[in-house]
Every structure is written in C-alpha cells, then in structure tokens.
Image: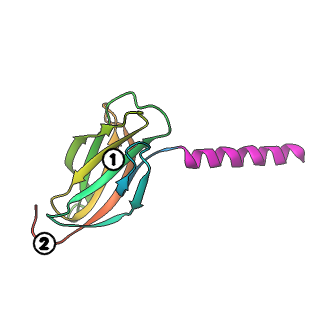
C-alpha cells in the first residue's frame, strides 16, 4: 500500500513539474524585458495598419538557449485546408538566454500558426492565432 501511495505522489510531482516547465510560445500584448513574463495572452487579435503588432515570446523550458531561434509564420489556406508558408524571421534572444521574443507585424487578417524553430528546422513550440484585420492592408 505504501508503494502505491509513493508511486502516486511521484507521478503527481513529475506531472506538475512537466506542466510548468516546458517549451512554449505565447502571443501577448506585453512582456517583461528582464524575465520574459507575458501579459495579455490571447488567441485572437484585432489588428489594422495602425496597430499590426503582436509580441511572440518563446520559453525554452527554463534552459539557456544555445542556438539561433527562428519564428516560422504559416497562414491557413481555406481552399486547401492546410497552412502555407508565409514568413520566417529571427527571434531576439534575451540576455539571460532562457527566452526569445519577436514583435511580429501582420499585414493582413487570417488564421496563423506561429512556431519557434531551431536552425535545423525542428519545431520547438507553436501557437495558433486568428488575426481579425480591419481597414486597408498594410
């Protein structure tokens, strides 16, 4: 009986740790320039030519980033029902090297998948956002 309790506690602790420490990318209104902590995290954004920007912050599981990180931007194609390559940018790596950021300026609305990737093209984390565009294109 004690072994079962111990195993259950170990499993719970491991799940809790893995839930909090993971590679992820978040779309946000703002972020702390020292810690990378995000605020105003949403999956849908209202944008226009005057306010086209969304911050994307990639967290590297609390570990130092030792290689370049790229932001892959793919846009959903309604006809093919697949994501098409739209853009690729270099992310700015923080001074403490545990997170990276990019201030992406959209030029049109749509459904986008944004991913942090390493130099080998391996996707480290991704997020899907809807950009609700108003007014003329940028």
Which span is picked out in magenta? 1-21
Q: Residues within 10 Å of mark 1 (few under 14, many from 20)?
A: many
Residue 131: x %, y % from top left:
26, 65
Residue drawn at the location 35% of the way across and 55% of the way down = 30
**Camera-side residue of 37 and 105:** 37
Question: What colouring style does the render use?
Answer: rainbow
Of residue 116 and residue 98, the one placed in the foreground of this image is: 98
Give the quarter of the figure containing the C terminus: bottom left
What is the spatial separation of the Cα atoms under label 1 and label 2, in whole angstroms? 27 Å
Image position, residue 75 (x, y; %): 23, 56
Give the left or right position of residue 22, taking residue 1 as reference.
left
Residue 135 circle label: 2
Q: Position of residue 72 (x, y in %)?
A: 27, 45
Q: Majority secondary structure of the magenta segment? A: helix
- Quarter of the image holding residue 27? bottom left
Write down the residue under mark 1. 115
Tell me: 25 left or right of 3. Answer: left
Q: Secondary structure at mark 2?
A: loop
Say which residue appears at 33% left-offset and 50% top-offset. Answer: 56
Q: Which residue is at a point 28% across and 44% down the rendered structure image?
A: 71
Q: Is residue 15 magenta?
A: yes
Comparing 3 with 132, the one in front is 132
Asked if 73 appears above or below 61 in the picture, the reply is: below
Instruction: Determine the secondary structure under disc 1.
Output: strand
């Amino acid at each position: 009986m004690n072994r079962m309790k111990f195993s259950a506690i170990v499993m719970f602790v491991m799940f809790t740790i893995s839930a909090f420490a993971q590679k992820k990318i978040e779309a946000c209104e703002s972020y702390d320039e020292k810690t990378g902590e995000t605020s105003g995290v949403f999956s849908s954004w209202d944008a226009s030519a005057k306010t086209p920007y969304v911050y994307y912050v990639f967290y590297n599981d609390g570990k130092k980033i030792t290689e370049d990180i790229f932001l892959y931007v793919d846009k959903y194609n309604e006809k093919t029902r697949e994501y098409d390559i739209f853009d690729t940018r270099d992310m700015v790596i923080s001074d403490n090297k545990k997170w990276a950021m990019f201030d992406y300026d959209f030029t049109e609305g749509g459904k986008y998948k944004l991913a942090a990737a390493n130099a080998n093209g391996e996707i480290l984390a991704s997020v899907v956002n809807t950009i609700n565009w108003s007014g003329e294109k940028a």
